[in-house]
Image (spheres, rainbow, N blue to C red):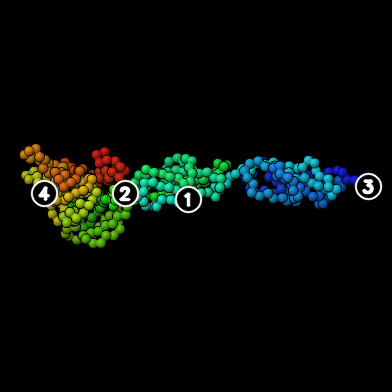
Amino acid sequence: MPPDISAPETTITAGPSGLNSNVDVSFEFTGSDDGTAALDLEFECALDGAPFESCASPYTIQDLTAGEHTFYVRAIDEALNVDATPAERTWTLVDLLAPETSLDSTPEELTTSTVATFTFSSDEPDATFECALNGADYTACTSPAFYSGLTVGLHNFSVRALDPAANADATPENYSWTIILPTAPATQIVVGPPALSVSAEAFFTFASDQPNVIFECALDGSAFTECETPFEIQELTDGLHETHAALFAQAPAANLLHLACHGRFRSDNPLFSSLQLADGWLTVRDTYNLKLQCDLVTLSACETGVSQVAPGDELIGLARGFFAAGAPTLLVSLWAVDDEATTQLMTLFYQRLLAGVGPAAAL
């Protein structure tokens, strides 16, 4: 019988082709030969030009990288004749899986520091990153990311990973924190009841010179408890609910002094122009003893800016008293004020102050 010198033929019957997103793929193949049955054929496989190695159908390849790949398989018959034209299949692995992003370190949620450092990582070691601060557009960044010169207030940092195929994490990591002043916050009562009222209810709104603060309220010397603006007190009894003593005790340490009450200008005796507190009138003479260190005094009452020219061209009125007490800036009224309009004005005024606008421009 003449020797078998005829090589077998190889056929790939199943496997990826074209564009494919699977990093693990499987091929099936068979062969035909004139002297060896298909079940008795041996096979050798190779990937992307690597050496052929013994293999069997089905054949699985794992952990492929993105890009073009070619699989080769050749049959060998019992006479060791090798298919000289191996079957081959070329396909392209498209990376459609976005990386995950992790924030590893952040600033404290509440801090006085105006610098911030973030470290971050991804589950894909070859990922790059994009960062955004306070809603700005994403820009390329590396870990650690460092920011300086930050202002007082709420800030937000966002970071996302991108893989070499430009897949971006659809759920970026976000972190919010607040920078506060190193000094204690100042509190301002923006709206309050008139000095004399027949109502058993009182409504207050208040603000601070620092963002994201927690307020505490107290009535008539009771213990302070946490509260929110607006704040309403019900079923008040008749009597006084604010005193000269409270004003003189708290005003010297305030950064901002806001008095919302009834005011009157005494044209017959300007030194007795006054603001009505719960336990009586605060006159111009009284204000000389306040010893203020605040940046702004707001007198939200009627005619608080009216003055009378005295001998020597001196202006006598409430404004003179508060200037003498140490106030560098006064917000006063030259006329009778309307409660509703004043409420709207003061709310907008303090909102602009908190946004960094100066007192004059805030008006």
| Left-right relation of 261 to 142 | left
CA distance for labels 2 and 1: 26 Å
Residues tagged 2 and 4 counted as in contact (Cβ below 8 A)? no
| Left-right relation of 163 to 48 | left
Answer whether residue 198 is visible to the viewer in this image: no
Residue visible at 55% across and 41% down?
A: 166
Q: Position of residue 177 (x, y in %)?
A: 39, 50
Q: Quadrant of residue 328?
A: top left
CA distance for labels 3 and 2: 101 Å
Amino acid type, label 3: Met
Q: Secondary structure at mark 2?
A: loop
Q: Earlier in the sequence, mark 3 or mark 2?
A: 3
| Left-right relation of 163 to 43 | left
CA distance for labels 4 and 3: 134 Å
10 Å crowding of disc 1: few (<14), some (14-19), many (20+): some
Give me the disc on residue 181: 2
Amino acid type, label 1: Leu
CA distance for labels 2 and 4: 34 Å
Q: Secondary structure at mark 3?
A: loop
Q: Position of residue 164 (x, y in %)?
A: 57, 42
Give me the disc on residue 285: 4
10 Å crowding of disc 2: few (<14), some (14-19), many (20+): some
Q: Secondary structure at mark 4?
A: helix
Give me the disc on residue 103: 1
Amino acid type, label 2: Leu
Q: Nearer the viewer, residue 26 or 345?
A: 26
Q: Nearer the viewer, residue 235 or 61?
A: 61
